Structure formats: structure tokens, C-alpha cells
Amino acid sequence: MSITISGMTKRFDRTEVLQGIDLDVADGELVALLGPSGSGKTTLLKIIAGLEWPDSGRLQVAGQDWLQLAARDRRIGFVFQHYALFPHMSVRDNIAFGLEVMPRGQRPSRAQIAAKVDELMAFLQIDQLADRYPAQLSGGQRQRVALGRALAIQPRVLLLDEPFGALDAAIRRDLRRWLRGVHEATGSTTIFVTHDQEEAFELADRVVVMGAGRIEQIGHADDIHDHPASPFVARFMGATV
Ligand code: ADP
């Protein structure tokens, strides 16, 4: 599903956290929002998810006005840095959860849910973890399960907020490769938030550099690296290389 954001602003108290965001994401694209802490990345993601409302601007998904849609009708898949899996549920039940709570009429049958979860676990290479509980998993395994849970509902848009932020460098690299493969196979329109340049450039089709509530530059990794559009981007790139 394509996403079109135009003229979006958001203020918390006296701070204008989003100062007029215009962004188009193509159907099936993986875009990284890259920027320092406090630049407004998470706020933008929350607005797309329906967890925050903008003060002005438009948000369309596949041509539909999403600001009119309740959060639960948006069919968003989410993974956060500290994504809480349900501790008392097995991996299998965590992944099935989004399907179990679908409204009557849309909810698949019990057998269909079981088949869907099996298929997804095999695809994500977590089938050997099916009967474990979150406390028995490593951080990297938990984030794979969290992605499984997000994908189970066949989201229209997948939002990932620093999903690997709490993990160490080697595991992050493995997960990046894995996520890239998953993205290529599912083709879900995905927005990935990170403050890590290497992560953004390795994963994304295009990178959106944000600073203090504005988009400073949108482009492919090489363009941004070789031709930073503003002193802010040049400094940010230099600072985090
Ligand atoms: P990022 O994800 O780039 O780190 P955020 O979108 O989380 O940035 O935050 C942008 C700014 O908005 C920060 O200054 C943050 O303190 C502020 N902010 C975020 N959420 C709230 C809130 N619910 N109430 C007040 N200020 C907030």
C-alpha cells in the first residue's frame, strides 16, 4: 500500500515536533527514517499507527484518508525496540494472538490460524521455538517472534521502531540480513526507524533523514553520503560514520 503524507505538523506543548512533513512511500517500499534522538521519528510512526493525532496535514494509505480510520481498522504491524511479547504465552500463541482477536467475520477458523502460524514460523525460521516462552528466548529471537506477530495479520503497513536497538552489533547485522530477506519475500510497505546510519543504508530502498521535526533529505544511500543536502545532514553523517 502506498503512503502519502503531506503538510503534517504536530506540537507537544510549545515544541513543534513535526514541522510540515511531506513524504511519499511507494507500495512495497522499505524506507528508513534516520535521525538523531528527538527528531520526531517515533511521533511520525505513531501518527501513522493511529496512536497520536497530527495538528494538521494529510495521511493517505492506498488513496484512503487514514486520519478518519480508527487505529484498530488500520491493520498495522508494529515492532518496537522493547516489544513486549506476552510472557505467559508460547511463541506459537504470541504469533496467533493478532488473528485470535480479529472481529467475528474476519477471524479465520482455529485450524486456519494454526496452519497460518505454522507457515509463518517456518518462513521466519523460528519454527523450532514454537513451544518456548519469551523468557526462554534470546533478544534476537524475541524480535523475530515480534515480527512474526506483526506479520500474522497481513498488515497493510509494517512499522518498525528501532526493533534491533537493544541488541549487540553482530546480532543486529544478522537480523538486518534476515529482515531484508523477509521484506523481499512479503513485499509489505515498511517504515523502519533508526538512528544508526549503517542500519538505514544497508536495509532501506530509500533513506529519509530527519532533524528537529523536518525532513532534511530523502534519497538513496550513496546520494546522501556523497551529496548531503544541508550542513545538518553533512554533520550528522560525519558524526555517526
Ligand atoms: P525520535 O523518535 O526521533 O527520538 P520522538 O518523536 O520520540 O523523536 O520525539 C520528538 C520530540 O517530541 C522529543 O523532544 C520528545 O521529547 C517529544 N515528545 C514525544 N512524545 C511526547 C509526548 N507524548 N509529550 C510531550 N513531548 C513528547
Image: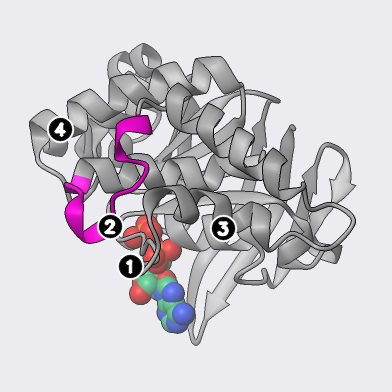
Pointers 3 and 1 in contact (C-beta within 8 Å): no
Q: CA distance from mark 4 to mark 3?
A: 26 Å
In the image, the residue with mark 2 has its CB under 8 Å from the nearest atom of ligand 1: no
* 177 displayed left or right of 43: left
Q: Please, is residue 70 above or below residue 229 in the view?
A: below
Pointers 3 and 2 in contact (C-beta within 8 Å): no
- Residue type at numbered disc 4: Ile
* 120 displayed left or right of 89: right
Q: Is residue 132 magenta?
A: yes
Q: Indicate which label's residue lies in the foreground, 4 or 3.
A: 3
Q: Residue beneath label 2, please?
A: 134
Q: Residues within 10 Å of mark 4 (few under 14, many from 20)?
A: few
Q: Quadrant of residue 121?
A: top left
- Depth check: 105 or 179 in front? 105
Q: CA distance from mark 3 to mark 2?
A: 14 Å
Q: CA distance from mark 2 to mark 1?
A: 6 Å
Q: Residue beneath label 3, please?
A: 97
